[in-house]
Image (cartoon, helix red, strand yellow):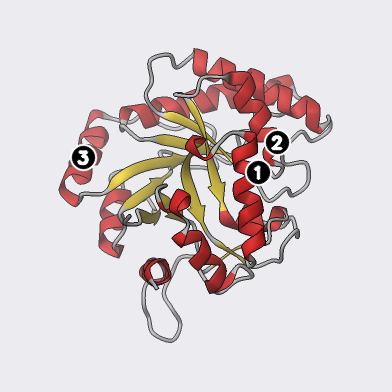
Amino acid sequence: MALIVGAHMSTQGGVWRGVERAKEVGCDCVQVFTKNNNQWSAKDLQSEDINQFAQQMKETGIVRPIAHASYLINMAAPSDELWKKSIAAMVDELRRAEQLHLDGVVVHPGSFTTSSAEEGVQRIIAAVKEVLAATIGFKVKLLLENTAGQGSNLGADLSELGTILAAVKQTERIGVCIDSCHAMAAGYDLAEAAGLKKLLADIDDQFGIERVAALHLNDSKKGCGSRVDRHEHIGQGTIGPEGFKRWLKNKSLRAIPMYLETPKGNDEETGEDLDVMNLRVVRELGKS
């Protein structure tokens, strides 16, 4: 089974530019922001944007496009003002993604801040239900991402994601995105075979691998259980090349589209584009 691997790409100059850039570096799939990820609001997508995006998808052969939602969204917020604002923003994210015919929108579940983890999970459940009720008929999926567990961030414990999915129940509307760096930071030692086995077992126990619609492929600068979210180039962090070989050769994981969120730029020694480098390493590890 061939890997489907791509990267998060910049949409500077137009959302369709992300697809164009993905093709230039050799991606099979792509993740983008459909708006500025550090702002609550944005101009509506124009018909020209939508049409150009569709045209680029057709011309480039890029598949499985997804978006990442704004980092400002916090569906676990105890503050009613921020909670309602987050729901409205998430509805807008799904609306924009639906216009572009994306597969899904990845979002961090949220942080409980001054409340408790249990209260935060219930807030997320209520928020997701409102978001899905406001987007009836949409095909795009809302994808909850596992987290590194920094501060009061929810989602490092996969049982929290399992509780949310079980309560929402709409299997065709909501799924999961698993991030390798976040899993490592949360306590799954992906440098070892036992760590990957434990992660896959917990996925099966909590919601099932069939609910995982996307993978974020990132090495981790910090060690297992650090609770620190710091992405590193593939094979150059604490997961390492052997850890990624096991990940990439796993039949269940190989079937899921993988999106790099590794550092951008050019290699200081060779000048090679870092996305090109990481994609090459992934493909080499996946077949070696």
Of pointers 2 and 3, the one earlier in the residue sequence: 3
Q: Residue pushed farthest bottom?
A: 269
For the residue labelled by badge 1, is the local secondary structure a helix, a strand or a loop? Answer: helix
The location of residue 193, given as percent across then percent down, is 62, 64
Residue 159, disc? 2
Q: Quadrant of the N terminus?
A: bottom left
Task: Single out the mark in the foreground, 2 or 3.
Answer: 2
Q: Camera-side residue: 127 or 284? A: 284
Query: How far is the residue under mark 1 from the one under mark 3?
Result: 41 Å
State if disc 3 and disc 1 touch (CB < 8 Å): no
Against 273, residue 76 (above or below) is above
The location of residue 3, given as percent across then percent down, is 35, 56
Q: Which residue is mark 3?
A: 52
Q: Which residue is mark 1?
A: 202
Q: Amino acid at mark 1?
A: Asp
For the residue labelled by badge 3, is the local secondary structure a helix, a strand or a loop? Answer: helix
The location of residue 127, given as percent across then percent down, is 62, 21
- Res 181 quadrant in image: bottom right
Q: Residues within 10 Å of mark 2 (few under 14, many from 20)?
A: some
Residue 27, disc? none
Q: Amino acid at mark 2?
A: Ser
Q: Left or right? Give the position of 196 relative to 47.
A: right
Query: How far is the residue under mark 2 from the one under mark 3?
Result: 40 Å
